[in-house]
Image (spheres, rainbow, N blue to C red):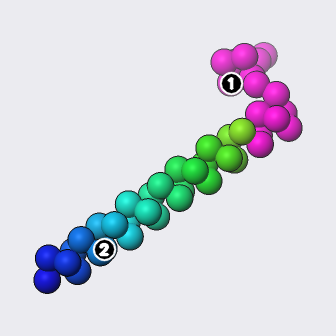
Amino acid sequence: MASDRNFFAKALDALMAGRAREAQRYVARFERDYGKLNGKLTKR
């Protein structure tokens, strides 16, 4: 029973790590395409 929990914990950790890498790639691509916003979200 403990090995099942360990398996699911490892699977969940891998899923979260994959999502984190995907988000980092998305942000990097956005910054390449649109440039950095100089820390300003709204420029009026």
The residue singled out by tag 2 in the image is 8
Residue numbers of the magenta segment: 29-44
Residue 39 occupies quadrant = top right
- Foreground mark, 1 or 2, reads 2
Magenta stretch, overall SS: loop
Residue 30 located left or right of residue 27: right
**Residue 7 sits above or below residue 29 on the image:** below
- Badge 1 marks a residue whose secondary structure is loop
Residue 15 located left or right of residue 7: right
Which residue is drawn at the image coordinates 24% and 71% (left, top)? 6
Which residue is drawn at the image coordinates 29% and 75% (left, top)? 7
- What amino acid is at disc 2? Phe
**Residue 5 sits above or below residue 28 on the image:** below
The residue singled out by tag 1 in the image is 41
In front: 35, or 5? 5
Residue 32 occupies quadrant = top right
Which residue is drawn at the image coordinates 44% and 63% (left, top)? 14
**Residue 11 sits above or below residue 40 on the image:** below
Residue 32 located left or right of residue 26: right
